[in-house]
């Protein structure tokens, strides 16, 4: 990585300020953060990023419980920014959510956050403005225990400690990533080899699975949506940790890693080449130590883990792998030859698809078949994990090669499978977390019960709670001193890491009085989990899915605790409107096929509910004609299969003798030039076929069936259209890259054509 | 005409794409030691290291030296050596994962430069564990062999491996035949008499086919018999009686497992975690 525009003079200044801060008697710990645009090269291309004090990730901020934090933000960007202190208890106005707890920090402005540190643990901080978190604005926020703390754990809290922040990097502009997600652009799937096309389905003997999947109106399933070019641990893809605090690491040493997942949308598997991982805290709260082989860290979670260096002369790989297993980053702990850990095998996507087929009902709801799922205990994705459920195809080779290190006859080894049999790998889940302390909430506090169903659909990338995005809901009023008990059911196909600002909540996980405290809870599809917390701090607290692109799509709520007067936001109503607006921005897409027989294209503006789209077919001569159709529609329902619309059509065509002038209903349309207003609806049928019916002001009716983007092979897409005007079209498109393709089609109006497709 | 020229441009572009020659740009060459044995190692090492136009590895089995040429703007030596190590071959920078090394064909199991005690320990406990178990078995409850074989059949069904399940069921039949009835405890004897016929029949059926679906049909009743036996006999660790509501065409079916975590033998990977523990037998 190389970062430009870094000014060493400023760094010196910062150091001076730091020392000045720590000398003061009141224990005010001051940090100056200079937020500045920069260029980085993480994955072969120079791209824009945001660096703070010249570095990515942002500097680790360290405090001790009892300090006063004073953090001065110097916004040297050309856009506004903000910093949110994730998991930190503080007065609402310091929480750092623009338009909810403060005004955005304007370009050029200097802004001071100041709050007392009243807790300890591993936390992190990040920008809460737009998609800035994706391009560098994340860092660790560590609050140490005081040594006289009663909860100080010898052998854990006094270990050599390293802060770790995980993140991902994409060479694409994150705004573009967001747009592509909303437009169901499957470039990410192509890059990941997760297209799950018909050819691939047939090759793996899963043709029926694929058909059933499309019948149930699902797009290819995946465990994550964005393709990343590089995974970073503390800003690097591979790092050697040879010493901590100036002390060389040697065999037998234990190291505590304070790990935050600062990724915008990636879950990471954490594994260690040197043996078991001991989990000692989550989201900054101590848990009874628990030994596991691996754990998955949800977006925005933190875990404190202890690892041991087993032998001298080796340094052991601590590997963070994305949930989709396409990318990873390494951290080598110790001195010597680097002992690697085997990468996680590729996901068996079609097994996952089969599982989803069984779970998905025809109406788009999920059916857990009477299994009560919770706390990440049952991971349905396990059907896709070859390391647990066996390899998809290579059973024979597996038998041959497994355990050949024993050098004995495989056929007779009774424990042939026990070594990596099911259950041999211990994976952490929430039911295993237990607080060392009693975390029971005051019994006398009144309890307010809330239920949320997490909803959304992949096709239009709309994510919501109770099928409402933030812009469709008011703040949820909560009395100060109430206990909020929230039950969350995930009825969507993706997992969601739900994060609450300002509080830790108890996860009701069967540990009774010792229920663990967290501020992020991952909810897998079909899971039902319950959390509770005492709302004893006034203010507007954000509650949202921490996958950045889900949050930006509106999967948010606000708890308004008490009647908080925020001096930073004189007009709270107006500010809330701005917040709502920001979480439901329209997305633009456009596409045109420059073909031998004309131009075929469309352009669309869409937000969570509305769609304004126009399609055109422009021939090169009057015979072929020119046609433009514009629709303004609103998507109805959770799955958004129905869209009523009003339309406006214009076309000009000089009829030839062989042209149809009658439609299937015998209605005639003789005019060469026609302008018509219509009313109609579009409905997504099984197999993802769009059925469109419309009636024009002159009484002419039109019914149409259309399917686009049938995934034939990894890069080949097919489509067709037929309507009651007896027009039809079939096409084949080869995807070259995210913006280009080659298309051939036959159109009843314009005949055969070959062309070059550009899409944005 | 306009469109025609576009097509030409596209075709020309395609042609350029394909016509590129496989030559490494910004080339840097280094010689590195990579541990290995034979010609088979050579092909694995080179295949793991090579990337068209970016990296080229040539390994000499006599000197164990690899000459590596790579595009220094696109990659680095560590990346190449890491790929080779993940294929099972140690270098002085990286040590291959033990499981990757273990997967190498026997002729390729070279002498490793850095030996770890962890690995040898593991292998040791592995061996001694087996023999210890075998001797203990004879002294202990003679039904244990029946249970052990049952669990093996179950594990095979969890993986939907019909052939393996059949093999394991053969072991189960043997174990059943080996039980000396008169040496059983009173209670055990009673249940044994009751379930014996069915138990034997189910075990034989499972052993005679490699069709996992058919095996599962018999596994339902087989599990019932074993459950009754386990209730009166004792097993060395707690056993979990588990239930999947979907199996047996929606009528539900049980099985026994040594682990509380659900690993469903009726659906394999399709529905691996479907079900719950209904009883713990200690």
Image (cartoon, coloured by chain):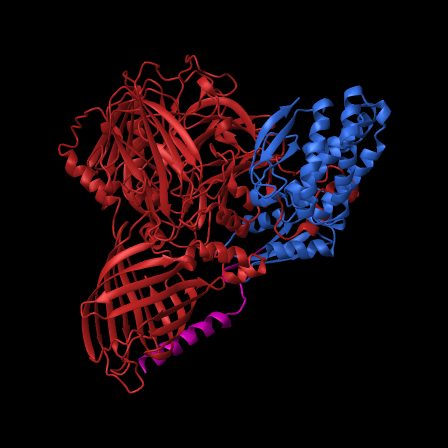
Query: In terms of depth relative to the viewer, which is nearer, A441 or A285?
Result: A441
Query: In terms of depth relative to the viewer, which is nearer, A365 or A116?
Result: A365
Query: In terms of depth relative to the viewer, which is nearer, A101 or A628?
Result: A628
Span colored in magenta: B1-29
Question: Is A516 in the magenta?
Answer: no
Name the spot of residue A672 as percent of width and height, x first.
21, 80
Q: Is residue B244 left or right of residue A65?
A: right
Q: Is residue A750 above or below residue A165?
A: below
Q: Colour of chain A?
A: red
Question: Chain letter for blue?
Answer: B
Q: Is residue A579 left or right of residue B30?
A: left
Q: Main secondary structure of the magenta part?
A: helix
Q: What residue is rendered at 63% in x and 28% in y? A: B240
Residue B268 picture quarter: top right
Q: What residue is rendered at 69% in x and 37% in y? A: B221
Question: Is B26 in the magenta?
Answer: yes
Q: Is residue A287 left or right of residue A637?
A: right
């Amino acid at each position: 990585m190389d970062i430009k525009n870094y000014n060493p003079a400023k760094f010196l200044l910062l150091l001076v300020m730091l020392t000045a801060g720590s000398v003061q008697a009141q224990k005010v710990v001051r940090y100056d953060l200079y937020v500045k645009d920069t260029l980085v090269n993480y994955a072969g291309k120079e791209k824009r990023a945001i660096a703070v004090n010249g570095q990515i990730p942002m500097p680790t901020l360290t405090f001790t419980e009892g300090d006063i934090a004073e953090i001065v933000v110097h916004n040297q960007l050309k856009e506004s920014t903000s910093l949110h202190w994730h998991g930190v208890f503080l007065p609402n106005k310091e929480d750092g959510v623009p338009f909810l707890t403060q005004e955005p920090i304007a370009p050029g402005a200097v802004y001071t956050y100041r709050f007392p540190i009243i807790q300890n643990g591993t936390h992190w901080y990040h920008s809460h403005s737009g998609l800035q978190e994706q391009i560098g604005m994340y860092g660790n926020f560590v609050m140490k225990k005081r040594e006289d703390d009663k909860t100080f754990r010898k052998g854990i809290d006094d270990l050599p400690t390293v802060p770790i922040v995980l993140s991902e990097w994409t060479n694409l502009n994150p705004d573009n990533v967001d747009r592509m997600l909303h437009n169901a652009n499957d470039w990410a799937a192509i890059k990941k080899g997760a297209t799950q096309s018909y050819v691939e389905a047939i090759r793996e003997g899963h043709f029926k699975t694929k058909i059933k999947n499309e019948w149930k109106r699902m797009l290819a399933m995946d465990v994550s949506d964005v393709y990343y070019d590089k995974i970073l641990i503390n800003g690097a893809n591979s790092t050697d940790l040879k010493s901590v605090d100036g002390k060389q690491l040697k065999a037998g040493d234990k190291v505590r890693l304070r790990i935050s997942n600062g990724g915008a949308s990636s879950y990471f598997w954490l594994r260690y080449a040197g043996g078991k991982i001991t989990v000692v805290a989550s989201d900054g709260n101590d848990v009874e130590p628990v030994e596991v082989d691996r754990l998955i860290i949800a977006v925005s979670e933190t875990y404190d883990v202890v690892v041991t260096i087993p032998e001298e002369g080796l340094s052991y790989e601590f590997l963070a792998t994305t949930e989709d297993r396409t990318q990873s980053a390494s951290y080598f702990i110790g001195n010597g030859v680097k002992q690697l850990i085997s990468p996680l095998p590729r996901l068996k996507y079609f097994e996952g698809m089969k599982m989803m087929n069984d779970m998905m009902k025809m109406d788009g709801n999920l059916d857990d078949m009477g299994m009560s799922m919770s706390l990440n205990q049952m991971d349905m994705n396990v059907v896709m994990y070859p390391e647990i459920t066996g390899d998809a195809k290579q059973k024979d080779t597996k038998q041959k090669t497994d355990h050949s290190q024993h050098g004995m006859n495989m056929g007779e080894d009774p424990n042939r499978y026990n070594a990596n049999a099911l259950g041999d790998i211990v994976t952490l889940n929430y039911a295993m977390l237990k607080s060392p302390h009693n975390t029971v909430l005051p019994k006398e506090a009144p309890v307010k019960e809330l239920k949320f169903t997490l909803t959304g659909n992949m096709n239009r990338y709309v994510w919501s709670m109770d099928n409402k995005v933030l812009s469709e809901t008011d703040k949820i009023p909560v009395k100060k001193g109430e206990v909020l008990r929230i039950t969350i059911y995930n009825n969507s196909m993706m997992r969601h890491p739900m994060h609450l600002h300002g509080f830790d909540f108890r996860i009701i996980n069967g540990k009774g009085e010792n229920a663990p405290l967290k501020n992020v809870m991952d909810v897998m599809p079909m899971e039902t989990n319950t959390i509770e917390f005492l709302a004893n701090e006034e203010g507007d607290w954000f509650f949202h899915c921490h996958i950045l692109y889900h949050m930006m799509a509106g999967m948010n709520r606000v708890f308004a605790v008490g009647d908080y007067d925020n001096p930073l936001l004189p007009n709270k109503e107006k500010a809330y409107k701005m917040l709502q607006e920001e979480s439901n921005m329209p997305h633009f897409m456009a596409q045109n096929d420059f073909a031998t027989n004309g131009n075929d294209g469309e352009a669309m503006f869409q937000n969570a509910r509305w769609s304004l789209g126009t399609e055109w077919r422009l021939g090169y001569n009057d015979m072929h004609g020119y046609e433009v159709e514009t629709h303004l529609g609103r998507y109805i329902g959770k799955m958004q299969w129905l869209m009523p619309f009003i339309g406006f059509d214009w076309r000009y065509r000089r009829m030839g003798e062989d042209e149809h002038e009658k439609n299937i209903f015998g209605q005639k349309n003789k005019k060469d030039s026609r302008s018509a207003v219509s009313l109609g609806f579009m409905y997504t049928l099984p197999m993802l076929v769009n059925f469109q019916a419309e009636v024009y002001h002159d009484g002419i009716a039109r019914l149409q069936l259309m399917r686009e983007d049938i995934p034939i092979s990894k890069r080949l897409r097919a489509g067709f259209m037929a309507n009651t005007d007896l027009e039809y079209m079939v096409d084949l498109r080869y995807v070259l890259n995210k913006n280009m393709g080659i298309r051939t089609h036959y159109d009843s109006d314009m005949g055969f054509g070959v062309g070059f497709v550009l899409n944005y | 005409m306009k469109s025609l020229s576009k097509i030409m441009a596209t075709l020309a572009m395609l042609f350029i794409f394909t016509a590129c020659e496989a030559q490494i740009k910004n080339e840097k060459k280094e010689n590195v030691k990579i541990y290995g044995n034979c010609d088979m190692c050579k092909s694995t090492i080179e295949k793991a290291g090579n990337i068209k136009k970016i990296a080229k590895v040539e390994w000499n089995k006599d000197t164990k030296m690899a000459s590596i040429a790579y595009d220094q703007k696109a990659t680095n030596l560590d990346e190449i050596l890491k790929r080779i190590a993940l294929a099972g071959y140690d270098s002085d920078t990286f040590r291959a994962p033990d499981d990757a090394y273990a997967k190498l064909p026997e002729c390729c199991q070279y002498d490793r430069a850095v030996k770890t005690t962890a690995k040898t320990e593991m292998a040791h406990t592995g061996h001694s564990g087996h023999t210890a178990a075998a001797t203990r078995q004879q002294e202990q409850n003679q039904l244990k062999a029946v249970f052990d074989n049952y669990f093996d059949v179950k594990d095979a069904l969890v993986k939907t491996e019909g052939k393996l399940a059949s093999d394991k069921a053969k072991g189960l039949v043997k174990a059943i035949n080996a039980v000396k009835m008169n040496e059983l405890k009173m209670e055990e004897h009673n249940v044994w008499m009751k379930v014996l016929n069915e138990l034997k029949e189910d075990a034989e059926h499972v052993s005679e086919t490699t069709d996992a679906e058919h095996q599962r049909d018999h596994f339902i009743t087989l599990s019932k018999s074993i459950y009754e036996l386990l209730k009166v006999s004792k097993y060395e660790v707690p056993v979990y009686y588990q239930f999947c509501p979907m199996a047996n065409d929606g009528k539900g079916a049980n099985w026994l497992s040594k682990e509380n975590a659900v690993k469903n033998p009726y659906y394999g990977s399709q529905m691996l975690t479907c079900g719950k523990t209904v009883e713990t037998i200690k």
